[in-house]
Amino acid sequence: MSSSSPLEVTTVRIPDPGPLAPLAPGPSSTLWLHRGDGLVAWGEATRLETAGPDRFDEADRRWREWTAAAVIHDEVRRPGTGPVAFGSFTFAATGTSALVVPRVLIGRRDGDSWMTTVGTPPRPVPRQEPAPMPRATWRNDPTAKSHWQNTVDEAVRRIRDGEARKIVLARQTVVELSRAADLRTLAATLSDRYPDCFTFAVDGLTGATPELLVRRMGRQLTSLVLAGTSWPGGATPIGTAKNAEEHGYAAASATDALRPFCAELRHWDRPELLRLPHLTHLATRITGTLNEDVSSLGLAGALHPTAAVGGTPTDRALALIQALENTDRGRYAAPVGWQDARGDGEWCIALRCAAIEGNRLRLYAGCGIVADSEPETEWQETEVKLTAMRTLFEDRAPARGQRIDHHTQATRPAPPHL
């Protein structure tokens, strides 16, 4: 193939390959896992980097140009086949966001399995056995708790003074590893422990997030908004007015952002309960039918940041976050996911995650602050949310069995797909 020839992308149907995570040949592979299905990929055919307030639109435009110039042979033709770009975006307009197109991808969804190659099929990559979890040393900051509580106090004061109605604050903690972590080991362990979360390893960011920002399949969209949290032994039951207020802002901001794109938009009048091994969230499921050809990435850009991760009103909350947090969130609490050439895709909010920096992991956790928030309770909430990543380096595994139910009805098994 000459350098001027169009790039060829080929998707073929394959037999069920079994568990996906073990298929990744190296420690820096890309993974997207959910309830046994998902995508595993390696190599890099191209990388599209963007920055600034228009980073989502710019990435979507460049992806459309790239796929338009490719010659695509797709015998499966379903979401996730043909060329796929995996994306990880910054929370704020600063920093660099990226779409990465792998050279090889293996996918499985609802009984269909496929392999996609970009360009000349690469030679088989010698498979490296996944490395066990490295030893971890937690960096102890004796001032972290008091600093956090003072920040929450100040946020509550600002809210009571009328500067905002909700502010989502986040904190970081750092763990030093005895050697670089193998993303396959991290992702496989997270996927096994939290099968109903979306487990991801994308461009140096890994985690297991319960929050689906948006899924687009054809003209149908789905979003699952989470806000309002309780946990065993916590001081705030899930049914409190504080949790209801916090959740209401998040659900309203998502529906307001999606409504202009939809001929029909539906959601439950009252939130559901999303039960995770360590905590419970209030959840509102939103479904809709698109009235225009907007891609999943375009929808993610229109949604970000919802009040679940920013606050309300959005502009005031973001300004207060910048003033109060005094730190860079990086890609925490921002969209992470994938999109194919048709615009179908899944984008989650990067929560319960860690940024990988060589032999160091930077972990993040946050919570929504409203007028009734208590600093000690908010500290405890962030500690519980850090558990998903912390327990990767402990022998003790958390309980399994996430469930979702209406909060006015008996608990029932989770539905087939979020």
Image (cartoon, rainbow, N blue to C red):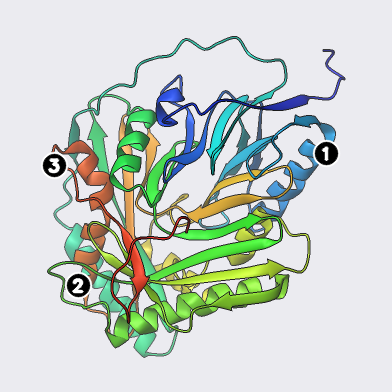
Classify residue 41 as left or right of residue 27: right
SS of the residue at dot 3? loop
Residue 46 quadrant: top right
Q: Which residue occupies 41% across, 78% down? A: 271
Q: Mark 1 belongs to which amino acid?
A: Ala
Identify which amino acid the numbered label 3 is placed on: Arg
- Residue visible at 73% across and 32% down in the picture: 75
Q: Earlier in the sequence, mark 3 or mark 2?
A: 2
Q: Nearer the viewer, residue 236 or 223?
A: 223
How far apart in space, not on screen, are marks 3 and 1 (Cα)? 49 Å
Image coordinates for residue 396, horizontal then vertical, percent:
13, 42
Question: Disc 3 marks which residue?
Answer: 396
Q: Secondary structure at mark 2?
A: helix
Assign a secondary structure to mark 1: helix
Q: Badge 2 is on which residue?
A: 377
Q: Is residue 353 left or right of residue 29?
A: left
